[in-house]
Image (tube, rainbow, N blue to C red):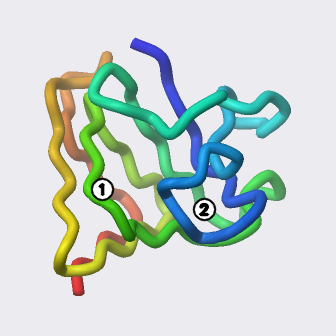
Amino acid sequence: MPTAYWAGGTSTDTNTAANWVDAANGTNPFGSVPDGNDDVIIQSTSNSNVDRNPIQNAAHTFNSIVIESGGHWTADGTNHLTLNGENGSDFAFAIDGTYTHS
């Protein structure tokens, strides 16, 4: 499974492709908004490659999502997050950071 890392380079919008990169160091664009075939990792904003925390303002389907320590994902109440499977660590949803659903 491809892995998309949140970088937030242009905004907090999770539905903007330019906010996603293909590596933890944030050097290459992922090329699209992740989908049901992709694992997603939300890193801490203390990572120099993460500019801002994500806000989910559209429905998303990912294979899995990991919110690392210090990472934060905010979902508004009208949009669903669907997970299709598990990542290589056998998790579909792993939270060491913060998940907020408002």
Kind of residue sitting beneath label 1: Ile
Q: Which residue does the image show at 83% across and 57% down from the upper left?
A: 48
Q: What element does badge 2 sit on?
A: loop
Q: Relative to residue 79, is residue 51 drawn left or right?
A: right
Q: Relative to residue 7, is residue 80 drawn left or right?
A: left
Q: Which residue does the image show at 50% across and 25% down from the upper left?
A: 3
Quadrant showing the N terminus:
top left
How busy is the neighbourhood of tag 2: few (under 14 within 10 Å), some, or many (20 plus)?
A: many
Quadrant showing the C terminus:
bottom left
Question: In which quarter of the view is residue 83 placed?
Answer: top left
Q: Which residue does the image show at 49% across and 54% down from the upper left?
A: 15
Q: What element does badge 1 sit on?
A: strand
Q: Can you give x and y, in whole percent of width and height, for residue 87 in the image?
A: 29, 23
Please say if 68 is above or below 54.
above
The number of numbered badges drawn on the structure is 2
How busy is the neighbourhood of tag 1: few (under 14 within 10 Å), some, or many (20 plus)?
A: some
Please say if 101 is above or below 13.
below
Please say if 93 is above or below 35.
below
Q: Which residue does the image show at 15% across and 25% down from the upper left?
A: 85
| Mark 2 touches mark 1? (CB < 8 Å) | no
Say which label, 2 or 1, has the lower sequence index. Answer: 2
Q: Relative to residue 53, is residue 93 drawn left or right?
A: left
| Mark 2, residue position | 44
Q: Nearer the viewer, residue 18 or 38?
A: 18
Q: Can you give x and y, in whole percent of width and height, for residue 92 in the image?
A: 19, 35
Question: In which quarter of the view is residue 24 placed?
Answer: top right
- Mark 2 and mark 1: span between their CA atoms? 12 Å
Kind of residue sitting beneath label 2: Ser
Please say if 38 is above or below 21.
above
| Mark 1, residue position | 95
